[in-house]
Amino acid sequence: MGSIQLQHVNKSFGAHAVIPDASLEIKDGEFVVFVGPSGCGKSTLLRLIAGLEDTTSGQILLDGQDMTAAPPARRQLAMVFQSYALYPHMTVGQNIGFPLKMAGMDKASIEGKVKEAAAVLNLTNYLDRRPRNLSGGQRQRVAIGRAIVRQPKAFLFDEPLSNLDAALRVNMRLEISELHQQLKTTMVYVTHDQVEAMTMADRIVVLNAGNIEQFGSPMELYRHPANRFVAGFIGSPRMNFIDGPEAAKHNAASIGFRPEHISVSATSGSWHGTVGVAEHLGSDTFLHVNVDGLGLMTVRTEGEKQLHHGDAVWLTPDPQRVYRFDKDGRSLAAA
Amino acid sequence: MAREATIQRKITVTAAAWVVALVIFFPILWTILTSFKSEGDAINLSHFFSTPWTIDSYFEVQSRSDYFHHFFNSVIISIGSTVLALLFSIPAAWSMAFAPTSRTRDLMMWMLSTKMMPAVGVLVPIYLIFKTLGLLDNVWGIMSILMLMNLPIVVWMLYTYFKEIPVDILEAARMDGATLGKELVYVLVPMAVPGIASTMLLNIILAWNEAFWTLNLTTINAAPLTAFIASYSSPEGLFWAKLSAASTLAIAPILVLGWISQRQLVRGLTFGAVK
């Protein structure tokens, strides 16, 4: 079991509230991702759950039990840090076995469990090495090994992939997702990368300035963002926003179109513009178009499209996919 | 041309360094040489090197005032005070480095400021306290006063080393179920071994050489080597050869310790400076 409940949690440093008032419920076995720009309080929220920070007010319940005042050691949670935080003076085997040693398990059982975890993570040949003799990916695996070995109630990940190179990051992302399928243990994962959030999460918490903007499944957030912030944050490239008279035509203070919901034509369409930069990725082409009277817009089109700087184009947004927002940025019901 | 100039410069600098080193080392050399002379030759500077060498002074010193008794006192006092200091200062430095409050900085400055006060300023009250508690000429008494004297430096040094340890690793230990004590024993202390070792060495040396409190608070039972040396400068006149033999015997162990551990000491003292 591993459900996590936050009830009106507040965290302030002096007069500054990093988390003004957060309430959410993470179900047992769920993979929840906290996402938001840097400084939005996502890591603080994770550290509050871990017990590494004390709440200013509010309650944290683990499996329905109030753990607000419990020290980290008593919460039975495991955490994987951005810096891996391996013990440099211990071997890989000792690192993985450390939580078991702290739990007072006997040597023979520790050895068995460590071997088991090492086998799952392809670390069997490295058990006698020190962390400094491992690559970044291997260190990350050791950190995960240390987390899974004692079967915690939940795993907490604090931007675990941000120190890895791009190729390794994709691999590790898959490995963590697979691990979740295997273990079916609750995972809470912090990242600023919305691609990680979209691909890994059962549900995503979008945070902004310490406030939970929206909590829902990736596709829910993509299709029905609660406000302009979520609409802009989820989706890559980000949504195009238009204010003023063009938005007023849709009875809204501002409207948004995703780059993939705009079609491009050389001959006719709703808006005329000129291509500023064309990014050819092979699979897709991202066009940054200067639209007359509306400004810069990003459009996603097929990879083979041959358009270049200075070409004149016509853009037509999909009328079914217009996102409308009121003057406070809140989403309006579909027109 | 440039190459010649560089070589010339190197020679000049090396020569200058040797001169400075010899000047600094000369008193020690003189002491050692004098200890192997008879009392008569010791004060006769006209034949500095050409005297009949003898080890009589060493035998005399041992038989007159029992070198080994003082040596063991020095060992017990310096190591004991260091171990006591570490027991207090490791938790103190931990909390200052990893759980600081708004007053930590001031507290550390205050601690350091106690070292700026001349020791003689508190001699009378401390002497009276020791007298009342029956701690005069007591190994435990002198051990605890030396521990207190060096505590600010030990806490400061350990604090500097601990600051270099990433807090993530300690937090990882907490998440892994370590209590505060286990976090210190299994993670912090092993990671800070180089720093703790050099702090220990420095503290042992400081305690070994300490001569104010040891001379004022001990007489025979707890008297370390400093008191042993001092007993040879008496009102009846100086015995240069015996005084030198006593001094040589007193500094030899710490010199050997310093020599063996010099790499550790330099590394410890410059720790963090190059990071």
Image (cartoon, rainbow, N blue to C red):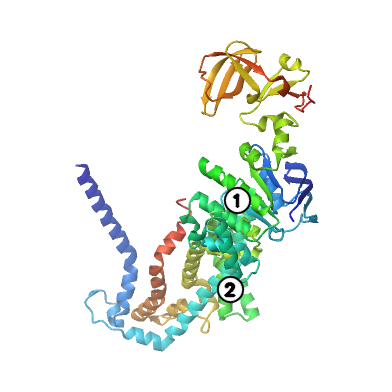
- Identity of the residue furthest to the bottom in this view: B63
| Residue plotted at (63% across, 25% down) | A260
Distance of label 2 from label 1 (alpha carbons): 42 Å
Chain of residue at mark 1: A
Q: Tell me if B211 is positioned left or right of B23 in this view.
A: right
Res A298 quadrant in image: top right
Q: Nearer the viewer, mark 2 or mark 1?
A: 1
The picture places residue B267, in percent across and down from the top left corner, at: 43, 59
In the rendered image, residue B103, in percent from the top left (x then y), is placed at 66, 53
Q: Which residue is mark 2?
A: B144
Residue B35, how many percent across, how many down?
32, 79
Name the side, left or right, on which A16 lies relative to B216. Answer: right
Give the vertical position of A227 relative to B21 (above or below).
above
Q: How many marks?
A: 2
In the image, taking residue A7 as reference, residue B8 lies left or right, namely left
Crowd around label 1: few <14 · some 14–19 · many ≥20 (10 Å) = many
Tag shown at residue A81: 1
Identify which amino acid the numbered label 2 is placed on: Ser
